[in-house]
C-alpha cells in the first residue's frame, strides 16, 4: 500500500512540465533543497525518520562538509533562520570570529613609506582564517530544538567520508583547478590532491575527516574545540604561521539573535541581522522596489534592470559605510530601514544612471565563485529552516588541517582590511567592518523565510558573495510580483549592482542587444559573468504542497516526500 501511495505521489508530483524548461520538485510532507544530491538525500532520510528541520539541517550540514568540500564545512561558519509551526521565529549566528591576536592592520605592509595591502594573506593560507563556528552552531541548534539523537545525525556524514562518494563532473573540474593553490599551503598529502587529474565519478575518500566527525559524534562541541581536533588545529597554526589559539577555540560560541523583519506587499520578510548585512540590505531593497513600483515594468526589461541597479547601488553604498558586527559597532539599523530615510535615498533615482562622478571607482579584482552553500528545509510539522554556511572562497584558505582532514576558512577577507580597499568580491568598507579581536566579519549571507497571511510562504537563500543579497531580492520579486513558481524564479537570469565597481554585473544572455544598448544610453556599463547564484529554495503553494527550487547552475537538488 505504502509503495502504491509513494508511486502515486511520485508520478503526480515529481515534475510539473517536462517538455518545458521548468521542471520542479513538488511534495506534500517535507522538502530539502541543497547544493549536493547526496546531502539532500541525507536530509530527506532524517525527515522520513520523523526528525524535524533542525535535525535534518544538522545532518545536511555535516554531509555537505564531506560531499561538498569547496563550501560545506567544519572549518567555517554561517547563519540559520528558522520559523516554527507556531509562528515563532529566530536566528542563530555561528559566524567565524577574528582571533584574539588579530589586529586592524594585520594585512598591511610598508612599501616606500606607505601602507599597502598584502593581498594574498587574507585569502590564502593560515593567516586568512577566522575561528570556526559551524560545529558550535550545529550543537547549539541541536541542544535547543533537536528531536533525534545527536549520533544519528553524524552517522551519514561519517559513512560518506570513510566509504567515499563519487564526485560530480563540476567537482572534478573544480578540484583540478585549485590543485596548485592546495600545493602552495599544504606540505603534507591531502585527500583533495590526486596524482592524475580528477574525473567525474572518481571516489573521494576522506579518512581523517571521518575521524574528526566521529570525535564530534562522541564529544559534540569538545570533539572539535578541545581534545585531539583542537590539538591538530593548533599544531597546524604553529606549523603554518597562523594565529588561532587554544583560548580562541575554547571561547567560541554561537549567538541567538533577533531576526531583521520587514514587509513587502503584505509579506513578512524574516532575515539575518548583523553581522550579516543581508537582512538590512534586503529590507532596503524591497522598500525601494515598493516605492518605485518596479512591478509595473516588464521582468528584466531595460527599465526594470535600470531601476533595480540604481536601488542596489545605493543600498551597497550604505552597506560599505554603516554595516559591521553590531557587538562592536553601532549599526544604525532603525534609520537604515526607516521609510523616511529610504524615500529620500531612493527619491533621487530617475530614468538616467546616477552620474559616475558621485561614485568612487575601486581597484577591483572580482572573483567568480559560488563557494558558500545554502540549504532550505521544511518538515511535515510545518517548521522551516534556512541555513547559509561558508568557508568564503572556494575551499577557503586551502589549508587542510593535517590529521583532521577539513579545510579552514579564509573569512578574514570579509573584513575591510583597509578602508576603501575591495575584498575578493569587490566590496569595500571602513571603520564599521575593520578588524578587531573577537569581532565577526561582515557577511552578505541572507538566509530568509517569508510569511504570507501569517503562514509559511517561502524559504530561500544562496551563495554568491556580494551577489547573495541581490539574488535573494530578485527571486522574491520573481515570485511575488511576476507570479513565477519556485524553480522558475531560481532559473530566472540574475543581475547585480554593488555600487563599486560602477557596473551592472550580469549573467550571460540575460538581456537582448536592444535592452543592453538602451541601458548603455542611460549611462550603464556591464561586467558579464557565466552565472550568478546557486539558489536552494522552497515555496508553499496555495494548495499547501511544497515546491522545491534547486539551482541548475550547480549540482543542486531539491528532494521531497
Ligand atoms: O559571508 C559572506 O558574505 C561571504 N563569505 C560569502 C562567500 C560566498 O558566498 C562565496 N561564494 N561566492
Image (spheres, helix red, strand yellow):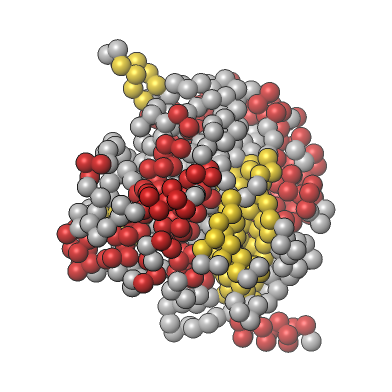
Instruction: Please say whether residue 330 is visible from this viewpoint.
Output: yes
Residue at horizontal 70 percent and vertical 50 percent from the top: 158
Tell me: 344 left or right of 438: left
Q: Give x and y (percent) for residue 72.
A: 58, 49
Place residue 227 in its image quadrant: top right
Could you say which is closer to the camera, residue 109 or residue 443? 443
Residue at horizontal 41 percent and vertical 57 percent from the top: 288
Q: Give x and y (percent) for residue 361.
A: 26, 39
Instruction: Please say whether residue 124 is visible from this viewpoint.
Output: no
Q: Give x and y (percent) for residue 553.
A: 44, 62
Could you say which is closer to the camera, residue 531 or residue 443? 443
The vertical placement of 97 against 32, above or below, is above
Residue at horizontal 71 percent and vertical 62 percent from the top: 87
The vertical placement of 152 against 540, above or below, is above
Residue at horizontal 78 percent and vertical 49 percent from the top: 144
| Quadrant (top left/top right/bottom left/bottom right) for the N terminus | bottom right
Q: Give x and y (percent) for residue 220.
A: 77, 41
Tell me: 456 left or right of 363: right
How many marks the image carries: the answer is 0
Residue ranking furthest to the front: 340
Could you say which is closer to the camera, residue 528 or residue 441? 441
The vertical placement of 113 against 534, above or below, is above
Tell me: 447 left or right of 53: left
| Quadrant (top left/top right/bottom left/bottom right) for the C terminus | bottom right
Amino acid at each position: 500500500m505504502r509503495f502504491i501511495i509513494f508511486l502515486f505521489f511520485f508520478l503526480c508530483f515529481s515534475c510539473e512540465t517536462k517538455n518545458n524548461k521548468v521542471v520542479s520538485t513538488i511534495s506534500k510532507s517535507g522538502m530539502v533543497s541543497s547544493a549536493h544530491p547526496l546531502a539532500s538525500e541525507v536530509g530527506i532520510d532524517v525527515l522520513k525518520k520523523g526528525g524535524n528541520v533542525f535535525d535534518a539541517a544538522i545532518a545536511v550540514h555535516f554531509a555537505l562538509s564531506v560531499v561538498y568540500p569547496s563550501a560545506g564545512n567544519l572549518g567555517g561558519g554561517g547563519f540559520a533562520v528558522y520559523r516554527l509551526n507556531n509562528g515563532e521565529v529566530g536566528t542563530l549566528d555561528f559566524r567565524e570570529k577574528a582571533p584574539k591576536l588579530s589586529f586592524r592592520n594585520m594585512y598591511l605592509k610598508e612599501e616606500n613609506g606607505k601602507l599597502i595591502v598584502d593581498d594574498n594573506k587574507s585569502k590564502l593560507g593560515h593567516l586568512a582564517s577566522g575561528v570556526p563556528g559551524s560545529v558550535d552552531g550545529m550543537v547549539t541548534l541541536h541542544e535547543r530544538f533537536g528531536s533525534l539523537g545527536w549520533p544519528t545525525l553524524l552517522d551519514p556524514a561519517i559513512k560518506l567520508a570513510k566509504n567515499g562518494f563519487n564526485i560530480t563532473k563540476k567537482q572534478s573540474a573544480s578540484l583540478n583547478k585549485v590543485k596548485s593553490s592546495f600545493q602552495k599551503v599544504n606540505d603534507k598529502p591531502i585527500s583533495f590532491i590526486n596524482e592524475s587529474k580528477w574525473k567525474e565519478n572518481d571516489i573521494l575518500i576522506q579518512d581523517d575527516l571521518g575521524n574528526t566527525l566521529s570525535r564530534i559524534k562522541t564529544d559534540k562541541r569538545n570533539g572539535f574545540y578541545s581534545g585531539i581536533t583542537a590539538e591538530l588545529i593548533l599544531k597546524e597554526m604553529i606549523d603554518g604561521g597562523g594565529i588561532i589559539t587554544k583560548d580562541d577555540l575554547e571561547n567560541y560560541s554561537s549567538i541567538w539573535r533577533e531576526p531583521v523583519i520587514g514587509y513587502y506587499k503584505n509579506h513578512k520578510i524574516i532575515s539575518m541581522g548583523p553581522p550579516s548585512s543581508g537582512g538590512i540590505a534586503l529590507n532596503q531593497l524591497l522598500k525601494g522596489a515598493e516605492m518605485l513600483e518596479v512591478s509595473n515594468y516588464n521582468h528584466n526589461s531595460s527599465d526594470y534592470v535600470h531601476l533595480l541597479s540604481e536601488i542596489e547601488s545605493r543600498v551597497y553604498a550604505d552597506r560599505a559605510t554603516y554595516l559591521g558586527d553590531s557587538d562592536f559597532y553601532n549599526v544604525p539599523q532603525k534609520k537604515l530601514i526607516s521609510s523616511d530615510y529610504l524615500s529620500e535615498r531612493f527619491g533621487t533615482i530617475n530614468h538616467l544612471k546616477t552620474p559616475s562622478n558621485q561614485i568612487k571607482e575601486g581597484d577591483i579584482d572580482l572573483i567568480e565563485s559560488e563557494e558558500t552553500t545554502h540549504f532550505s528545509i521544511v518538515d511535515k510539522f510545518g517548521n522551516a529552516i534556512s541555513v547559509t554556511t561558508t568557508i568564503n572562497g572556494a575551499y577557503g584558505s586551502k589549508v587542510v588541517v593535517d590529521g583532521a582532514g577539513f579545510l579552514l576558512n579564509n573569512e578574514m577577507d570579509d573584513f575591510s582590511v583597509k578602508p576603501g580597499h575591495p575584498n575578493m568580491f569587490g566590496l569595500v568598507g571602513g571603520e564599521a567592518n575593520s578588524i578587531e579581536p573577537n569581532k565577526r566579519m561582515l557577511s552578505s549571507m541572507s538566509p530568509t523565510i517569508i510569511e504570507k497571511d501569517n503562514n509559511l510562504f517561502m524559504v530561500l537563500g544562496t551563495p554568491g558573495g556580494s551577489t547573495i543579497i541581490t539574488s535573494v531580492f530578485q527571486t522574491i520579486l520573481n515570485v511575488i510580483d511576476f507570479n513565477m513558481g519556485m524553480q522558475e524564479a531560481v532559473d530566472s537570469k540574475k543581475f547585480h549592482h554593488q555600487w563599486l565597481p560602477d557596473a551592472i554585473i550580469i549573467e550571460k544572455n540575460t538581456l537582448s542587444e536592444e535592452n543592453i544598448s538602451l541601458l548603455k544610453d542611460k549611462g550603464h556599463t556591464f561586467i558579464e559573468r557565466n552565472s550568478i547564484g546557486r539558489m536552494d529554495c522552497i515555496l508553499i503553494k496555495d494548495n499547501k504542497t511544497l515546491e522545491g527550487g534547486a539551482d541548475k547552475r550547480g549540482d543542486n537538488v531539491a528532494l521531497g516526500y
